[in-house]
Image (cartoon, rainbow, N blue to C red):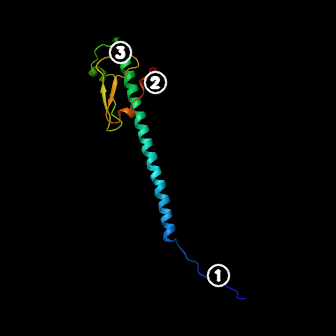
Amino acid sequence: MKITNTRSLKSAKGMTLLELTVVILVLLSLISILFVGARAWKKGSDRAANIMNIRNCQQAMRGYQNMYQKQEGAAFVTADLTNYVKFPTEPNKNLTYAPGTVITTPGVFWLGVTGSDAADMTPDPATTSDW
């Protein structure tokens, strides 16, 4: 029986090409999941910013209406409100805000939203009656 000295055998060091490819694929898949999550987070934050802008402008319009005792349906000059509230900027380039020209009834948006993302970014009027 021959005794082999295991200390004298040299083990191969480093990674094979297959192991390196697997590691790179795992890292790329994790990065792609990160980008998908970041895109969803950005869309959600844009929607939240848009809803807050609409809400703040609705409250400013109601405050203006109460302060100057304006009736619903009365003509409304947007320039009158510029001293009362700073108009918001759109959260992304696919939205445009269009303020109304008359004082609306509660539950109806005064600040309109148009653009390709308007359907995803506009809240449901039925859920905003308590604003």
Disc 1 crowd, CA 10 A, few/some/many (<14, 14-19, 20+): few
The N terminus is located in which quarter?
bottom right
Give residue 100's position: percent from left, percent from top: 30, 22
Which residue lies under the disc numbered 1?
Answer: 7
Q: Label 1 amino acid?
A: Arg
Which residue lies under the disc numbered 2?
Answer: 127
Give residue 129's position: percent from left, percent from top: 44, 20
Give the image quarter of residue 125: top left
Residue displayed at 33% across by 26% down: 112
Q: CA distance from mark 1 to mark 2?
A: 75 Å
Give residue 37's position: percent from left, percent from top: 46, 46
Drawn side of residue 32 relative to residue 64, left or right: right
Drawn side of residue 79 relative to residue 117, left or right: left
- Considering only vertical position in the picture, is 120 above or below 68? below
Are dots 3 and 1 in contact, CB under 8 Å? Answer: no
Regarding residue 10, the answer to whether it shows in the image is yes
Q: Earlier in the sequence, mark 3 or mark 2?
A: 3
Disc 3 crowd, CA 10 A, few/some/many (<14, 14-19, 20+): some
Residue displayed at 48% across by 58% down: 27
Q: Earlier in the sequence, mark 3 or mark 1?
A: 1
Residue displayed at 28% across by 20% down: 101
Q: Label 2 amino acid?
A: Thr
**SS at mark 2?**
helix
